[in-house]
Image: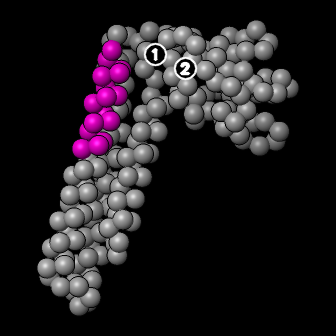
Amino acid sequence: MSDINEVRRRMEGAVKNLAGEFAAVRTGRASTGLLDRVVVDAYGTETPLNQLATISAPEARLITVSPYDPSIFGNVERALLESDLGLTPTSDGEILRLAIPELTEERRKELVRVVHKMAEEARVAVRNVRRDANNEAKRAEKDGEISKNDLARIQNNVQELTDEQVAAIDDLMARKEAEIMEV
């Protein structure tokens, strides 16, 4: 990694990706982020639902989906039914309603385990960036491009970035865990 900013960008990318994955983990509360991964076969192409409909959470346990174009209503409904959300939409012909059921204690604990696994995968991604950066710095030192002092400085900077990003991952995980366990 010739540039510490590139290392930072890659590590922050892993954290941002984790935040996106966490948004899709269902808690007991309605969140429009649950539908971020839903794609609809509309106009002959796979299109993200949020580009085809207004999505809102008017109540703590309800998400509404209102397609912009009534002709794709059936496609939107089918995509929601076929998604892995485990939610069944109810329809009045114009708006789809998704009721978010209360989570059982067992399901909450299972979701916490899923969140922990996602966080560990993000930590591994950050550590892989650290490994790549350190290997490149060692190669540059071996080839005489940088001194031993530069190598030590680069490794310290990369480790500080790693610690910072792992702390950010742990913070995200703790907040998501608290959100899941909240009754």
Relative side of 149 to 175, left or right: left
Tag shown at residue 125: none
Q: Is residue 31 magenta?
A: no
What amino acid type should be assigned to the residue bearing mark 1? Arg
Task: Residue at 45%, 28% (x, y): give it.
Answer: 25
Report the residue marked by disc 2: 86
Relative image position of residue 134 (x, y in whole percent): 25, 70
Q: Is residue 43 visible?
A: yes
The front one of 41 and 69 is 69
Task: Residue at 40%, 59% (x, y): give it.
Answer: 9
Report the residue marked by disc 1: 29
The front one of 91 and 158 is 158
Magenta stretch: helix, strand or loop mostly? helix
What amino acid type should be assigned to the residue bearing mark 2? Gly
State how far apart marks 1 and 2 are (Cα): 14 Å
Identify the element where label 1 is drawn.
Answer: loop
Identify the element where label 2 is drawn.
Answer: loop
Relative image position of residue 5 (x, y in whole percent): 36, 65
Pair 1/2: label in front = 1
The front one of 175 and 129 is 175
Q: Which range is magenta?
A: 167-182
Q: Earlier in the sequence, mark 1 or mark 2?
A: 1
Q: In the displayed structure, would residue 96 be above or below residue 121?
A: above
Q: Residue furthest bottom?
A: 144
